[in-house]
Image: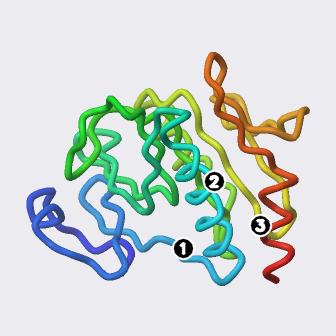
């Protein structure tokens, strides 16, 4: 169903299973993961969920985010500040957007996705690769692995300890 042309109004009025992204008038299927992707996504949500009050955040799975007037993305994990307005479709940059690589994701498509998030004003975009057990902080010039092994948000207690997170995935595999 990639590339089917629809209007913004039709996109917003239609439920897709699984949800689709809308990019400049065309519907695009998301690469849905297999077990490792799904498990890692669940582990990330759980990590943030059990710390949500301490960190003042709200983690969400597969939440539509309007990154531009005619561009709607559906990140794997969206982390809102607890005081951010709750909307049916997020129109204010979230605190963190996290993507988990699927086997069919390409570098080009992931770079376009990350660029959409950064251009929207998201300050923290993270990319997790369940196959290699690596993670990246994304910025306009590239993808950088955190030297400390922890994905952080400066000025907050937020820290995603990669060794602990990926250990959960290894135990389940």
Task: From the viewer's perspective, tell me whether residue 156 is left or right of residue 23.
Answer: right
Spatial CA span between label 2 and label 1: 23 Å
The residue that appears at 66% across and 74% down in the rendered structure is 39
Find disc 2 in the rendering and name its residue.
47
Pointer 3 local density, CA inside 10 Å: few below 14, some 14–19, many at least 20: many
Disc 3 to disc 2: CB gap under 8 Å:
no
Q: Circles 1 and 3: CB distance less than 8 Å?
A: no
Helix, strand or loop for disc 3 = loop
Label 1, on which residue? Answer: 31
Q: Quadrant of the rendered structure where residue 147 is?
A: top right
Q: Is residue 16 left or right of residue 73?
A: left
Q: Which of disc 1 and disc 2 is earlier in sequence?
A: 1
In the depicted structure, whether residue 28 falls above or below residue 7: below
Identify the secondary structure beneath mark 2: helix
Q: CA distance from mark 3 to mark 2?
A: 16 Å
In this view, 152 is above or below 74: above
Of the two numbered discs 1 and 3 in the rendering, the one whose residue sits closer to the viewer: 3
Q: Residue 129: x percent and y percent?
A: 76, 61
Query: Local crowd at mark 2 within 10 Å, few (<14), some, or many (≥20)?
Result: some
Up-down relation of residue 106 to residue 104 (above or below): above
Where, by quadrant of the figure, is residue 164 drawn?
Answer: bottom right
Tell me where residue 141 appears, x and y as whole percent.
70, 29
Between discs 3 and 2, the one toward the N terminus: 2
Callout in the foreground (2, 1): 2
**102 up-or-down from 68: above or below:** below
**Residue at (77% x, 58% y) in the render:** 165
């Amino acid at each position: 169903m990639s590339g089917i042309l629809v209007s913004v109004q039709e996109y917003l009025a239609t439920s897709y299973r699984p949800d689709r992204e809308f990019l400049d008038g065309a519907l695009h299927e998301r690469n849905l993961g297999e077990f490792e992707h799904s498990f890692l996504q669940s582990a990330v949500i759980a990590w943030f969920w059990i710390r949500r009050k301490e960190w003042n955040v709200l983690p969400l799975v597969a939440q539509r985010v309007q990154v531009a007037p005619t561009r709607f993305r559906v990140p794997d994990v969206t982390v809102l500040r607890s005081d951010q307005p709750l909307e049916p479709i997020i129109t204010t940059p979230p605190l963190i957007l996290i993507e988990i690589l699927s086997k069919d994701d390409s570098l080009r498509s992931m770079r376009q996705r990350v660029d959409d998030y950064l251009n929207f004003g998201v300050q923290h975009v993270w990319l997790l690769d369940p196959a290699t057990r690596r993670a990246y902080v994304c910025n306009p010039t590239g993808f950088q692995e955190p030297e400390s092994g922890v994905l952080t948000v400066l000025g907050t207690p937020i820290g995603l300890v990669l060794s602990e997170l990926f250990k959960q995935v290894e135990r389940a595999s």
